[in-house]
Amino acid sequence: MKLIAPSILSADFTRLGEEIRAVEAAGADWIHVDVMDGHFVPNITMGPLIAAAARRAAAMPIDVHLMIENPDACIPDFAKSGADWICVQAEACTHLNRTLQLIREQKCRAGVALNPATPPRAVEWVLELVDYVLVMSVNPGFGGQAFIPNSLEKIRMLRAMLDEKGSDALIQVDGGVNLSTIADVSAAGADCFVAGSAIYGAEDYAAVISAFREKMEAAA
Ligand code: DX5
Ligand code: ZN
């Protein structure tokens, strides 16, 4: 089962509830919340208050992507806000094993995101604590950037590693996913597709989500 997770980073924040309900009605599977702290990445976006608002707006799982330093300090607040899935950047975690345990103790699914320069082996020794691995296919910080082509090779390497280790963790891909890139991303072995500008920048959310689904399923 392939999943589509629109990122509210590209939504119209003056109408956030409406924007979330619109992608849910248009066939989205998850809602992706991009949290940035102005330290790990140069941008500042949203916190637990917005995750809680997203929770109230939608029945879909809430997927929180923490692009922040010291995520341990905030994980309990995001769990309380109603997050279902929480992922941390491997590069921001000195004690990744402990951080993943903390996410699961909060009754959330735990994920690790890998920057474009971070190799797949960064998750090799924590796989038993991981429900999803997020391959960043842009440098985190902003929506609307171009897909980095070598991400496809990283997805293939990760797929092989997960299969070899018997892990059923999902592979999520985030950054530059659009109608031109999604087929290749799907064929490489990704399960969950985050898209901000390609969905919220479109006139018709249902049309773009069903076009996504056609391309990713044809390529799978
Ligand atoms: C980037 C964020 C992404 C971003 C994707 O730092 O993690 O989730 O919203 O945006 P697009 O789909 O526009 O590349
Ligand atoms: Zn993201």
Image: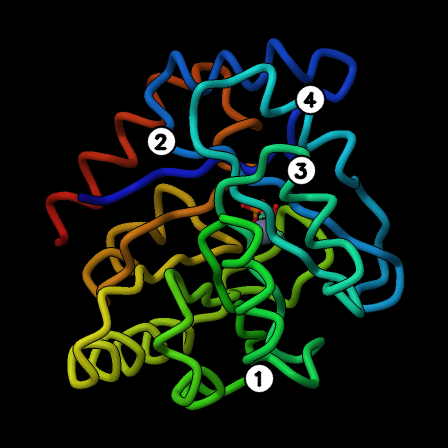
Residue in front for this viewpoint, 165 or 72:
72
Residue under circle 3?
80
Instruction: Give me the residue at 18% from left, 35% from top.
Output: 214
> Could you say which disc has been placed on residue 53 in the image?
4
Distance from Cα at disc 4 to Cα at disc 3: 12 Å
The numbered mark, 3 or 1, whose residue comes first in the sequence reads 3
SS at badge 1:
loop
**Front disc: 3 or 2:** 3
Residue under circle 2?
29
**Front disc: 4 or 3:** 3
For the C terminus, the quadrant is bottom left
> Could you say which disc has been placed on residue 117 in the image?
1
Q: Is residue 83 above or below residue 59?
A: below
The numbered mark, 4 or 2, whose residue comes first in the sequence reads 2
The numbered mark, 3 or 2, whose residue comes first in the sequence reads 2
52 relative to 173 in the view: left or right = right
SS at badge 4:
helix
- The type of colouring in the image is rainbow
Percent coordinates x, y for residue 161 in the rendering = 25, 84
19 relative to 132 in the view: left or right = right
> Is there a contact, CB below 8 Å, between mark 3 and mark 1?
no
Distance from Cα at disc 3 to Cα at disc 1: 32 Å
Q: Amino acid at mark 1?
A: Ala
Q: Is residue 56 above or below residue 49?
A: above
Q: Is mark 2 within 8 Å of ligand 2?
A: no
> Is there a contact, CB below 8 Å, between mark 1 and mark 2?
no
The numbered mark, 1 or 2, whose residue comes first in the sequence reads 2
